[in-house]
Each structure stands twice: as structure tokens, then as C-alpha cells.
Amino acid sequence: MRRYWHPVAASSKVTSRPQQVRILCEDLILFRDGSGRPGLLYPHCIHRGTSLFWGHVEEDGIRCCYHGWKFDVEGNCLQQPCEPNGGVNRAAHRQPWYAVREQYGLVWAYMGPPEKMPLLPNFDHMEILNEGEFYFVLDNSILSHADLKGPSVVPYSWLNLNENTMDPFHVYILHANFGTTHFIPDFAVMPQVTFDEIGVGTTYTASRTMLDGREMKRVVTWIAPNMAVIPGSDAGRCDALAIFTAVDNEHSRTFVTKRAPAGFTEKDIFEGKGFAAAKPWTQMTVEERQDAPNDYEAQSSQGPSGLPSSSNEHLVRSDIGIGIQRRVLRREIKKVGDGKDPINVAFRPEEATIRTPSGNVFSNPQA
Ligand code: FES
Ligand SMILES: [Fe+2]
């Protein structure tokens, strides 16, 4: 995971108010300086350890509250006001920092070996913003809940979420045939499913006859190691990207960024969907959650670690996608261990674009 860029926050949430973020088991301080540059620093001031959470942001950096040392977004010490001449030796002191970039409405960080820092990838389906469009970011890890007001961080591994993306059969059971309709009623029809390994990861194609007689082909892509392009039920190419960020081994955070037209809101996500009328998850009692469980109930109760050894699993035919994902991850972990570069890491611009076939195609037999 240290060989990839990871989103740490929605750009719109990164302000001059310092905030604590946890990612890849590290606690860090995220802020935006007065000139608009985001910064991600080690929390404890290298002077005597006070947290920069209590610091104040200025035009060119963040100032520690205890003795006023000031650091820029790359950790350079700009001032030591209690030292002679503002700290003649301040260049010898650097606050640990990570590289950050902004793209698709998200602040991304690279926390790996500096000499192996790859390019931040492009995703061709996200690249072109038409007039008035913007990147709408959902910072919510329970995306199939009616109010999208669930927690941003959930108490289970990114692997639980990752494996959900290559699991078309839970869409048929959990989301359509188990107490309520989370997406569209048509998902209550059992699909024919094929899995295909593609260069960037794996796809599944779920084909089903819709309730109105049309044939629907829904293609979902998992991008190794922790991203997915998951269409809803609308026709055409998917216009969103989901990233499952590892907070630590037992917590994760899902960011979804979507190309959306001007004025687009959370309400638009539910327009015409079955869950528009459902009770918000945050207001449901335990009994109501038993009556109509959702991804949170299914995934959190698998156990926090998401590792096969931690649960009593019995993988079967319908788990082919999970098997492919695990094989790919093991293969790539071995590559890194052998000193090679893993999948979807690029150093040359012409190799830094990720393409996926995700989307929905409808064919009308009457047409
Ligand atoms: S502890 Fe930060 S300036 Fe002293
Ligand atoms: Fe789901």
C-alpha cells in the first residue's frame, strides 16, 4: 500500500483549520496554508512534541502553539522565534511530511519510499469535465444507505470493502431480496455473471432481464489494489471512482468521487431508486437493521481484519471474483517483496492513465 497514492480527504474539507487524519496506521495533521497549498505533517512538533493540531495556519505554513516554530507544507522550518535571529540553525530542523496532490476533488498523499514515488494516476472516465460539471465527493463508507449520513470511517478492513466490489451476488440477495430494496427493484432478478481479469484488475459482467423486458449488462471493475469503478443503474459509462483507503488494519474509509452536473446534490443519487423512501440508517433501531440489513451489517460482522484466516470461510463457485482479487494481491505483494514495481504504478505519463470498461448497456429486444 505504501507504493500507491491514497486519498486522505475531500479537497473541500481541507482548510486552514488543522485536522487529524489517520491513514496506513499513522496519525497525521492535514491543513491548507494561506496560499492554498495542502500539507500533511507528522503531528508532534520536532521541537518538543506538541501537536500541530493546536497550531495556527499562516500564509506560508503552520505555526506550533508552544514556542512558535513555523513549518511549511514540506516541513521546512521557516521560523524559530525564541532563538537568536529567528533561528540561525533552523534549516537543520525539518518536520516530517508527506507529498500531497489534488485531483478529482480529493487530496491524495504518497507515503512510500520517496525514490519510488509514482505518478498520480489519471482515470480516463474522470478526465473530461464538461461545462458546469464538477467532482462531487462522497466521504461515506456505507454507500448503499438511504441518507448517506453513515460514518466516514468504519471499523473494519479495506479488504472487506474491496471484496464487496467483486461480489455481484450480494447485490441480488442483500440489496434486493432481503427485506428491502437498496438500489432498483430489477436487481432482484438473478444475473448471469462472468469474471474477466483485465490489465488493471478484474471486471465482472452481470447480465439480467429487467422487469420491463430489456436486457441489462452491468460491468463493474476492480482496480488493484483498492479502487473500483461501480456503475449504478443508469445507462452509459460509469462516471465515478471509489477508493477504499486503509486507515489501519481494522478501520477503513471509502471515498467516492463522481463527475456531476452543476447543482448536483446527495438527493440526486437517490432519485428514482428504491431506497429513496427508506429510513436513514442512522435512525434505525437494531431490530430494524435486522429486518433490512445492509452492507454495514454484512461487512462489519465478517470481522474487523478482512483476512481469510480470521473467519470460517467456505469459498464456493460464486466467489470466483474474490479468489481472483486475492490471487492478484498475493502476486503483487510478492513482486514488491522481490524488489519489483507492483501493478498500476507508473513513472511515465504515457503509462499513468487507467482505463476501465465500467458501465451499463441496455438492449431492448423490441427495438
Ligand atoms: S514544541 Fe513546537 S515550538 Fe516548541
Ligand atoms: Fe453492497
Image: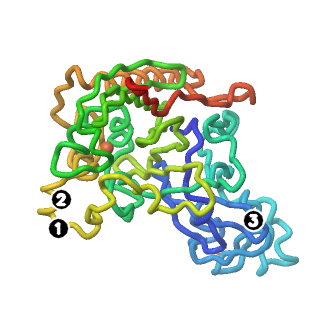
Q: Tell me the element at label 2.
A: helix
Dot 3 beta carbon under 8 Å from ligand 1: no
Q: Is residue 199 left or right of residue 90?
A: left
Residue 72 against residue 198 in the figure, above or below: below
Q: Nearer the viewer, mark 2 or mark 3?
A: 2
Q: Position of residue 304 (x, y in %)?
A: 28, 47
Tell me the crowding category of disc 3: few under 14, some 14 to 19, or many 20 or more residues within 10 angstroms, Cα based. Answer: few
Kindly tell me whether mark 1's CB lies below 8 Å from ligand 2.
Answer: no
Q: Quadrant of residue 165?
A: top left
Disc 3 marks a residue whose amino acid type is Gly
* Label 2 sits on residue: 289
- Dot label at residue 285: 1
Residue 294 drawn at (x, y percent)? 25, 51
Closer to the camera in the image, 212 or 301: 212
Q: Where residue 110 sits in the image (x, y, percent)?
A: 62, 45
Q: Is residue 125 left or right of residue 58?
A: left
Q: Which amino acid type is shown beneath numbered disc 2?
A: Arg
